[in-house]
Amino acid sequence: MAGLALTPALAIAPHGAWAEGEGAALPDTSSLPPSLSHAARSGGRYYGAAARADHLLQDKALRAAVLRDCEVLTPEIHLKWNSLEWRKGQFHFDPVDDLLTFADDNGLRVRGHTLLWDQSTPDWAKHEMLDKRDWRLMSEHFSRVLGRYGSRIEEWDVINEPIDTEAGARTLRRNTFFRAFGPTYIERAMEEARAYAPKAHLVINDYGFEYGNPVDKARRQAFVALARRLRAANVPLDGVGVQAHLDLSKGPIDAVGLQEMTKALIDLGLDITVTELDVKESEAAAPTAARDQKVADETRRYLDVMLAFPEVRGVVTWGLTDKFSWLTEQVDARVRAAHGANRGLPYDDAYSPKPMYWALNETLRASA
C-alpha cells in the first residue's frame, strides 16, 4: 500500500560503500532490551522492516538500527514494476541488487514486495494489457523478476491489494489486471509465480481489516472468501499478508473480527505475516509523550490479537524510523513544521526508541 515509486530507480553506489554515509551513529541503546529480531525469534517468528538501499547507504544511524533490530528487509519501492521498468525495456535492477547485497553481507533476508500492484504498474504496461489482452506481458514480467531473484528471495507478495468491497466487482478490485484478464488473473498469477519460483513462499497481501466499521468488516469477509476460493481450486497460495496500517482516527480495533478472520485463514491451511505495520496519528497537536503512548497502545492492542496465533510467522513494520516514513510524507507541511513527523514507527526521526519500540519488543517476547 505504501511507498509508491513515481520515478525510475537509479543505481545508488558501488557495492562495498556501506561503511560510509552521513549522519551520526545510532544513539546509545545499552538501556534497551535485546533486539526486536531477538524478541521475535524467541517466539519462532521474524521481525523486519521496509527499507531502501539508497537510504541505508546514506544514513549511518539507519544502518545501525536495521542491523540491530531486523532479520528481514522489505524493499520499500524498488522491486515494484514501475521502479524496475518505468519505460518498456529499460530495466533498473541496481537498487534491488544493492539491498540484496547488503542483506547477504549482514546475514539478513529479503521479502519480495511486490510482483503485481496496480498502483505500481507502469502506464505503458497498463495500456498494453488493456489494448492487447495478451498474458505474455505478465509472463515476461514474472520470468524476468523471478528469474533474477526467485532463488534469493524466499517469500513473495505475488499480488498486492486485490480486494475492493466498495467499487469492486465480485469483491475484487477492478484494477488493470481484472479489466484485462478477468477475475481469474489471480489464479493465473499465482500459478505463474510457482512456475518460476517453485520453492518460494507465495502470498497475497492486502489492507483494511482492523476496525469495526462496515468497510473493514466487509473487507475481512472478502479476503477470507478469496482465500477459500483459491484453496478450493488448489491454487499455489501458501500464506497471506495483512498490512496493518493502523489509524488512530478509526476508533477501537475490532479484536473479535480480527480473531475470526485470522482463524478462518488459518483453518484454510494458510500462515500469516503482518507485512506493513505502522500507526497513523490523529492528534498531531497533542504533547509528544501522549502521542507516543497512543501509538504504542494501538500497536500493543493489535499485536495482542494477532500474536496469539502461532501461525503468524513474522511482523514487518513499514520502516523503522519516522525520518523515512510514508506517513510523514503525507503530513501537511504546516502541520509538520509545527508538530513534526508522524510518530508511527519504533524510532523517532533522531533514532531514539519510542514507546512503540517497547510495545513491539514486549508483545513479541510475551507471545513466546
Image (cartoon, helix red, strand yellow):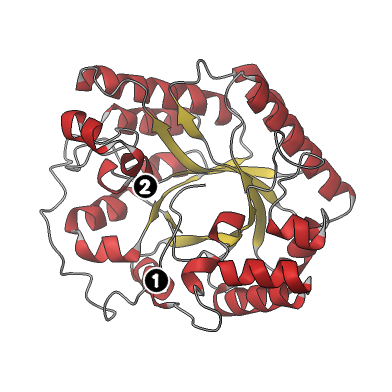
Mark 2: amino acid: Gly
* Residue name at image x 44 percent, y 34 percent: 364
The residue to which callout 2 is attached is 319
Q: Residues within 10 Å of mark 2 (few under 14, many from 20)?
A: many
The answer to which of marks 1 and 2 sits earlier in the sequence is 1
Looking at the image, which is closer to me, 248 or 153? Answer: 248
| Residue occupying the far bottom of the picture | 89
Q: Is residue 106 above or below residue 47?
A: below
Looking at the image, which is closer to me, 302 or 34? Answer: 302
Taking the image as drawn, is residue 236 in sight? Answer: no
- Give the tally of numbered discs: 2
Looking at the image, which is closer to me, 80 or 53? Answer: 80
Determine which quarter of the picture holds residue 108: bottom left
* Residue name at image x 41 percent, y 71 percent: 8
* Residue name at image x 33 percent, y 77 percent: 11
Mark 1: amino acid: Ala
Q: Position of residue 303 (x, y in %)?
A: 50, 28
The residue to which callout 1 is attached is 9
In the displayed structure, does residue 301 sit left or right of residue 35?
right
Q: Position of residue 89 (x, y in %)?
A: 55, 84
Q: Is residue 242 above or below residue 220?
A: below
Looking at the image, which is closer to me, 81 or 67? Answer: 81
Distance from Cα at disc 1 to Cα at disc 2: 19 Å
